[in-house]
Amino acid sequence: MTTSTRGAAKTPAVLVLEDGRIFRGRAYGAVGETFGEAVFSTGMTGYQETLTDPSYHRQVVVMTAPHVGNTGVNDEDMESKKIWVSGYVVRDPARVPSSWRSRRTLDEELDAQGVVGISGIDTRALTRHLRERGAMRVGIFSGGAVQDDAALLARVQEAPQMKGANLSAEVATTEPYVVPAIGEKKFTVAAVDLGIKGMTPHRMAERGIEVHVLPATATVEDVYAVNPDGVFFSNGPGDPATADHPVSVMRGVLERGTPLFGICFGNQILGRALGFGTFKLKYGHRGINQPVQDRTTGKVEVTAHNHGFAVDAPLDKVSDTPFGRAEVSHVCLNDNVVEGLQLLDRPAFSVQYHPEAAAGPHDAAYLFDRFVSLMEGQRA
């Protein structure tokens, strides 16, 4: 529930974690109340892309960078049609944006889209708390929504948890659409939208790929109705343990041997399709500065992440799966979490992070070229 109001910065607000920790500050964005899973992002830039990433559905994002909103909001950097975060937490919001591309302030954009936030709190203390205790449910309350602390805590503890949440269909397109190739068309790709970002099909289009974006509910028959040279499974929110339908579709693709590429949620779907389990990370990886090693080349990449779940696959051995041999291709250097998978007997691979660089570094752009190489090899 939100109530749009200007001058919100003078309105008291309170953030209540499910374990009883409370932070008091000022309203930022819309005034009202919101609930979600408290997570933190370590990116110092790219907040507009973060806010509009569908993978953040039902999450309250805490920004570890102290100053947020410096470049305002423009009309070019949106990764989807709306802001998806459930709430937003910042320490020092910019009073005046400074960018020739800015069209409005971040505060105004949050307010216009009904996103309840809080500012003026110690985000370093909050981040340390989440690192020690783990991501957890949270509520932000401002204006008339502020009640006594015990009542607010009880409401937070009644909110749904992220574990067990099946959310991809809530953020995916409901109708198929096509992103045309830029220049000469070389390939056709069926992209299953589990929460896709706009830059992802654009990166494929830059490589001569016509991308048919399909709803999360698409069947194997829907995928092959577009006569694809390759199939892509996107990022998205929720618990991969609930994603039985996408897993079934991916197995159908693997059985046919079509070149396959998955990112983020798509990596977890591939893990499940191969017979591996998934698990919830303590506090996840979120930001644009995460170090990952490509074990096929030994190269270390700085990458953009947004995931709270991971694949449970052995790091140091080749595994036998129903679709041939598989191995871990990428690993996070901070905590040894699986960051990529590849099949050795079929043209399929995935990564847990975001190679489209929106926002983020360009170190992983080669993965789109690797996908193109698989399709070229299959065609040859």
Image: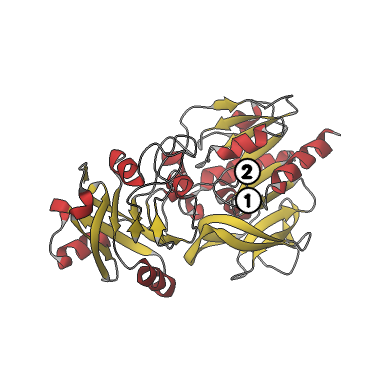
Q: Earlier in the sequence, mark 1 or mark 2?
A: 2
Q: Secondary structure at mark 2?
A: helix
Q: Is residue 34 visible?
A: yes
- Give residue 16's position: percent from left, percent from top: 26, 64
**Residue 37 against residue 243 in the figure, above or below:** below
Which quarter shows the N terminus? top left
What distance separates the C-alpha of mark 1 from that of mark 2?
7 Å
Is 229 left or right of 357, judged from the image as shown? right
Q: Secondary structure at mark 1?
A: helix
Indicate the colouring scheme.
secondary structure
Taking the view exactly as shown, the residue that stands out farthest to the right is: 380
Q: Could you say which quadrant of the image residue 191 lies in?
A: top right
Q: Which mark is residue 250?
A: 2
Q: Residues within 10 Å of mark 2 (few under 14, many from 20)?
A: many
The residue drawn where x is 45% and y is 34% is 75
Q: Residues within 10 Å of mark 1 (few under 14, many from 20)?
A: many
Q: Could you say which quadrant of the image residue 255 lies in?
A: top right
Which quarter shows the C terminus? top right
Q: Amino acid at mark 1?
A: Leu
Q: Is residue 32 visible?
A: no
Q: Amino acid at mark 2?
A: Met
Is 359 left or right of 336, judged from the image as shown? left
User: Where does label 1 land, which residue?
Assistant: 270
The residue drawn where x is 63% and y is 46% is 262
Is 55 left or right of 23, judged from the image as shown? right
- Give residue 65's position: percent from left, percent from top: 44, 61
Q: Are marks 1 and 2 in contact (CB under 8 Å)?
A: yes
Foreground pick, 354 / 317:
354
Taking the view exactly as shown, the residue that stands out farthest to the bottom is: 132
Q: Could you say which quadrant of the image residue 300 lies in?
A: bottom right
- Give residue 150's position: percent from left, percent from top: 16, 67
